[in-house]
Each structure stands twice: as C-alpha cells, then as structure tokens.
C-alpha cells in the first residue's frame, strides 16, 4: 500500500463508526463518483476478484430494518471459495475507510438485511456469495432511538483490553498496554483495535515478533460454511493492520505459511490466518 493512501485510510480508522441513521439527502453525483471508482478496486492479498457496485436499493425493494435515511448500498459478490470472506472484508473495508475520509457514513450489514432481496440484486447463484452489504450516505445530526439502543447493547464504543488482543512472541505473553511497544507499532495496532466487527466481537489476535505480526482468529460464533462473518472481520483487521503499519513507514507483505515457530496457540478456538512482514 502506498504511503498517501495509507495515511488517508489510517486516519479514517479513528473517525469511522457504524452509522445507521442518515440525513435522507440524496447521494450527490460528487459523493457517488469516488465510491464507484473505489468499488472497481478489488486488489486483495488473496487475489480473489470481487464485483462491487453502488445501488439505490429502493429500486429493488431491498432494505435493512436498522437503517434510517438512506437507500444507497454497496452490494457485491465473489466466487464461493476458501478465503472469499477475508478478501471481501479487506476490499470493502478499504472502500469504507475511503468513504469515511470523504465525510460519508457507512454500516456493514450481514444479519439485519432483507438478504434474499440483496442476493437478487447481487445476482448470487450457487457458485457465488455475498457475505454482507454496506449502507452508505450522509450521517444525520442525531442517531435514531434504535441506533442508540443498538450501540449501547453492543458496547460499540468499547474495545477489548490490549492484553486480550496483542501478544509478544507467543500467547503466553499478553501485552497489557501500548506503552510496552515501539510507539510506531503501537499506533499501527491502534488502527486494528478500532476496526468494526460483527456484534463487536473483535475476533483478531496479534502475536508480534521482530519484523512480523502473526494474525489469528478467535472464534466465538458458529462457523458458517458460506459467508462467515468472523472471517469477514479478519479481512477487515488485515486492511486496518496494513494501513496502520504503512502509515508508520512499515510497508508490509502478507504471507500465509503459518505462524513463527514457537508462537504456540494451545487454545482450539484460535486459528492462524495470515502473517504480515515489514
Ligand atoms: C462483518 C460485519 C457484519 C455486521 N453486521 C451488522 C448487522 O447485520 N447489523 C448491524 O446493525 N450492524 C452490523 N455490524 C456493525 C457492528 O455491530 C459494529 O461494527 C460494532 O458494533 C462496532 O461498532 P462500530 O462499527 O461503530 O465501531 C456488522 C459489522 C461487521 C464488521
């Protein structure tokens, strides 16, 4: 990721929150244009092509019961294959952070949508999946009562403590505070901590060693064979980690060859996902 884009995306990590209440204004062509351009950028560490498009969902009768004040959604699909969800999370989160930098609000939606209607829009068949859709628009000045209740129930403004998420060398050595890290690395990891996740479960675990971070998934929801949301969360975390590191001048490369020898992960709920080297 080049430095200019990383700076934009990493700054947006701090600004972004899920927006469920929009101001009901039509999405201007100036706002639509960058989104449409971004939707055509599907580069991802897995090399899986993804079709994304911006739609006015009203025309298709597709809605979400938690969204107020916008009919605009980013809808897409990709082939049903290993790592599709991580690739989708990575590509769509890049679009979300760029949209945030343009002053737009967004919401990842996997559960609270009229799924059959959105799948028809995305032209999903037995070979393709649409793991989630994204509501997009101008945030309203005030949240709906429903949104306030949802944020409170999800503890959406909170994140797990550092020692639950970040480890030095192996899982036996949790880091209790960012002060234990090199400041540039701590800033990069702050981007990951701020990431959105389904039900705010934050499944990412990061084991830091010299010049590399091994990323693991901590599974708490049942694995869905198609369109698993916690794997989408892992793709989102990969994008935040890559952008956060690149903003700090650490341009990372992804690999998938297993964790550093000795990283050790005795807990069966932990699965290795990827390594970034920098
Ligand atoms: C893959 C994924 C699926 C999500 N699905 C929904 C959903 O169906 N409905 C909803 O209201 N929020 C959904 N969210 C938003 C999360 O609840 C939200 O990210 C989390 O509570 C943290 O809040 P924040 O994004 O404001 O930081 C989803 C988020 C992700 C990443």
Image (tube, helix red, strand yellow):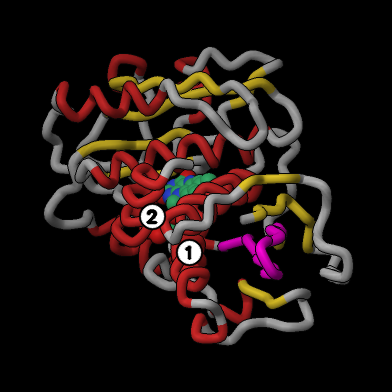
Instruction: Please give left or right for residue 9 compared with residue 254 in the image.
Output: left
Q: How far apart are marks 1 and 2 (CA)?
A: 8 Å
Mark 2: give few (<14), some (14-19) or many (20+) Cα within 10 Å: many
Residue 188 numbered mark, or none: 1
Q: Mark 2 points at which residue?
A: 10
Residue sitting at x 68%, y 56%: 221
The quarter of the picture where residue 141 lies is bottom left
Q: Is residue 275 above or below residue 55?
A: below
| Label 2 residue SS | helix
Please check the rendered image and state whether residue 56 is part of the magenta-colored stretch, yes or no: no
| Residue 221 appears in view | yes
Q: Are marks 1 and 2 in contact (CB under 8 Å)?
A: yes
The picture quadrant where one finds residue 80 is top right
- Decide which of 187, 15 is in the foreground and name it: 187
Q: In this view, does 221 lie above or below 49?
A: below
Determine the residue positioned at 26% across, 46% down: 101
| Residue 240 image point, x, y percent | 49, 53
Q: Considering only vertical position in the picture, is 53 above or below 202?
A: above
Which region shows up in magenta?
202-217
Residue 204 colored in magenta in the image: yes
**Is 246 displayed left or right of 104 in the figure?**
right
Total tally of numbered discs in the picture: 2
- Image: 97 above or below 209: above
Residue in view at x 71 percent, y 60 percent = 214
Closer to us: 256 or 14? 256
């Amino acid at each position: 990721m080049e430095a200019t884009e990383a700076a934009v995306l990493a700054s947006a990590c701090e600004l972004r929150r899920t927006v469920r209440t929009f101001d009901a204004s039509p999405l201007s062509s100036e706002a639509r244009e960058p989104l449409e351009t971004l939707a055509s950028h599907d580069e991802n560490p897995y090399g899986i092509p993804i079709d994304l498009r911006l739609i006015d969902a009203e025309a298709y009768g597709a809605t979400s019961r938690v969204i107020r004040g916008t009919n605009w959604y980013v809808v897409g699909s990709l082939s049903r294959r290993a790592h599709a969800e991580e690739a989708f999370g990575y590509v769509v989160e890049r679009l979300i952070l760029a949209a945030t930098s343009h002053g737009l609000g967004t919401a990842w939606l996997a559960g609270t949508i009229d799924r059959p209607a959105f799948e028809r829009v995305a032209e999903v068949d037995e070979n393709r999946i649409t793991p989630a859709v994204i509501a997009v628009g101008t945030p309203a000045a005030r949240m709906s009562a429903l949104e306030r209740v949802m944020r409170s129930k999800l503890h959406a403004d909170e994140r797990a403590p550092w020692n639950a998420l970040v480890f030095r060398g192996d899982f036996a050595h949790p880091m209790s505070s960012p002060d234990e890290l090199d400041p540039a690395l701590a800033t990069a990891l702050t981007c990951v901590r701020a990431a959105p996740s389904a039900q705010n479960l934050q499944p990412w675990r990061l084991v830091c060693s010299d010049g590399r971070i091994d990323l693991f998934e901590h599974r708490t929801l049942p694995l869905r064979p198609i369109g698993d949301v916690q794997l989408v969360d892992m793709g989102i975390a990969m994008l935040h980690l890559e952008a956060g590191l690149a903003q700090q001048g650490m341009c990372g490369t992804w690999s998938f060859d297993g964790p550093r020898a000795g990283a050790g992960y005795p807990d069966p709920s932990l699965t290795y996902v990827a390594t970034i080297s920098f």
